[in-house]
Amino acid sequence: MKHVHSGKVRDLYETDDGLLLMVASDRISAFDHVLQPDIPDKGAVLTQLSLWWFDQLKDIVPNHVVAPGDEARAVLCRPLRMVQVECVARGYLAGGGLSEYRAGGAVSGVPLPEGLKDGSRLPEPIFTPSTKAPQGEHDEPIPYERVVEEIGAETAAELRRITLAVYTRGAQIAAERGIILADTKIELGWDADGVLTLGDEVLTPDSSRFWPADEWRPGRSQPSFDKQYVRDWLLSPESGWDKSSGNPPPRLPDHVVERTRQRYLEAYERLTGAPFSG
Ligand code: ATP
Ligand code: MG
């Protein structure tokens, strides 16, 4: 197999029959740095959770999955021509959306009411696209009109429709399990027949913010089933790391690795309702 791409988290290979093998590693990144050490089982959890979600979403949008791989972390997919837009839907205010709102009262050009706090629920889910930055650079939020200029009104409308539909279905299923889906990012591409198809990973803790519903308190950062625990530790005095120093972050201590692994496993088990078997 030919190696075609390595991102911060995943490696892509081309098979002899022109398919893609996408392998999710156990690497974890935060603040644009890949951290040490790996989080055991993370890759398998993300791949298995994505496979489960693709199935829950298949009446909304076709997906790139051909078959599960030989390893739990791998999946065989159809190659897509990826749309160069990161499709984000937000139902709650957090992360980059919160910073944008604080700076200008809007997110990706969508104006929002005054008085919203960290973790506030939005009046309705919104589509907040961003650029797909080259490796090492930050994705930049872009207004919907920019998406229209770049890929045309018809495709832009499709991206928005599909992204919001995926968010709504995901949020509804998560809510039944006591989990808030605060936001999510999906990636779409055209298949060989020109059909917009869901690629990459979907509704994982790496691409989404999942919050335990019973602990949701707007006005502070929310406990979350993703790498929030890692981010909080990196920013705490215990890590001794200065984010603005340009230095790489310190190695994660065992308790942070174990706690983070537990969070990923818990997300899988609560969402799918099945034990994780790797
Ligand atoms: P990073 O996440 O580190 O910023 P990245 O997104 O390029 O960089 P990964 O997420 O690790 O890296 O790798 C997955 C890559 O594969 C992404 O570039 C994604 O757009 C691409 N991809 C996902 N599914 C498909 C597909 N079916 N066909 C072609 N490319 C795909
Ligand atoms: Mg990626």
Image (cartoon, rainbow, N blue to C red):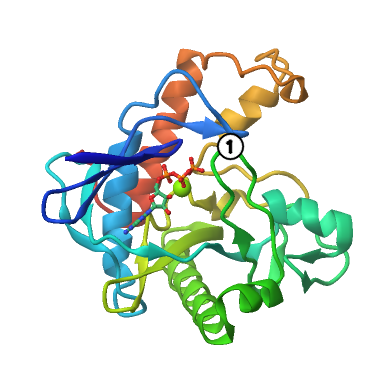
Position of residue 95 in the picture relative to residue 173 (left or right): right
Q: Residue at x 70, y 44 (%)?
A: 221
Q: 88 or 156, which is in the foreground?
A: 156
Q: Three-letter amino acid code at disc 1? A: Gly
Residue 211, position as x, y percentages in the image: 55, 51
Mark 1 is surrounded, within 10 Å at the Cα level, by few (under 14), some (14 to 19) or many (20 or more) other residues, namely few
Q: Is residue 192 above or below residue 258?
A: below
State the SS at label 1.
loop
Q: 258 or 21, which is in the foreground?
A: 21
Residue 131, position as x, y percentages in the image: 61, 58
Location of the C terminus by quadrant is top left
Location of the N terminus by quadrant is top left
Report whether residue 263 is seen: yes
Mark 1 lies within 8 Å of ligand 1 (Cβ measured): no
Q: Quadrant of residue 239?
A: top right
Q: Is residue 192 above or below residue 153?
A: above
Q: Which residue is mark 1?
A: 136
Position of residue 88 in the picture relative to residue 196 (left or right): right
Report whether residue 117 is seen: no
Q: Residue at x 49, y 43 (%)?
A: 225
Residue 13, position as x, y percentages in the image: 25, 43
Q: Residue at x 70, y 25 (%)?
A: 235
Query: Total of numbered circles in the picture?
Result: 1
Position of residue 42 in the picture relative to residue 170 (left or right): left
Residue 195, position as x, y percentages in the image: 33, 79
Q: 186 or 274, which is in the foreground?
A: 186
Q: Quadrant of residue 201?
A: bottom left
Q: Is residue 116 above or below residue 109?
A: above
